[in-house]
Image: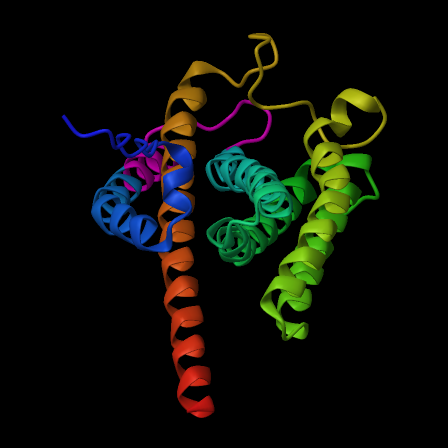
Amino acid sequence: MSGDKPAPVRRQGFWSYANPVKFLGFSERILPALWWLSGICLAVGLIWGFFFTPDDFRQGSTVKIIYLHVPSALMAINAWFMMLVASLIWLIRRHHVSALAARAAAPVGVVMTLIALVTGAIWGQPMWGTWWAWDPRLTSFLILFLFYLGYIALWEAVEDPDTAADLTSVLCLVGSVFAVLSRYAVNFWNQGLHQGASLSLDKEENVADVFYQPLLVAIAGFVLLFLALVLYRTGTEIRLRRTRALLARQRRT
């Protein structure tokens, strides 16, 4: 028998995906399914919602913009929370994939925020008689949109990637205040034009079932689309960083 100690078994868990090679392999396997599922859910949810649900007795056909407004608003806020988690992982464990995932999510989040702002104005104008009001929820949502723009600009402005990741992570922590306010402003303040949450644990606040079911399908489509875009963009960021590193190495030799 040999007296050598057996080599320690390396644990393979969630953190193993911080390895860029393993992350790329995983994303390439799962992306086709995500693209298909998101396309199916979006098609079913939006067609069902726009063409096979009745008009609301008070809002008429304008209520159907809910199938774009609510999912995009949910994703705008939750994208920032996803960036917050990824930023904390970067600050604590220094995993480059997490920093690149946060960077990849930002443009998706800003588009979702813009869709929510525009559709909210279109929905609100006939209901409130104005395109915009400095309502607590609307205002915090607009500030969140500006934080998204600042986050993207900061990544582009700082040349050193690690320094950029540090600074944008701190910005993400600060902006999370407005993500929370965007989500819970209607609970903190009673005043304002914005109505209560369309989806909640309180059944009395939920929209009617005839709108609720296609709305859930549309939300599933937005979530799957967000995941697919973030995985795809994170893979692109990893490959770009590798390409820059190779070019820099060639210039030194």
Q: Position of residue 52 (x, y in %)?
A: 32, 30
Question: Between residues 212 and 94, which one lies in front from this camera angle?
Answer: 94
Q: Position of residue 63 (x, y in %)?
A: 53, 33
Which residue appears at 76% of the width and 20% of the height? Answer: 187
Q: Which quarter of the figure has residue 44? A: top left
Which residue appears at 60% of the width and 54% of the height? Answer: 114
Q: Relative to 216, say whether 223 is above or below.
A: below
Magenta residues span 41-60
Question: Between residues 96 and 234, which one lies in front from this camera angle?
Answer: 96
- Which colour scheme appears in the figure? rainbow
* Residue 130 appears in the figure: no
Q: Position of residue 81 (x, y in %)?
A: 60, 38
- Judged from this view, the residue extending furthest toward the left is 1
> Across the whole image, how many numbered discs are drawn on residues?
0
Q: Is residue 251 left or right of residue 110?
A: left
Q: Relative to 101, say whether 71 is above or below.
A: above
Residue 47, magenta (yes or no) = yes
Which residue appears at 54% of the width and 53% of the height? Answer: 99
Q: Which quarter of the figure has residue 34? A: top left
Q: Is residue 11 left or right of residue 169?
A: left
* Residue 198 appears in the figure: yes
Q: Relative to 231, say whether 78 is above or below.
A: above
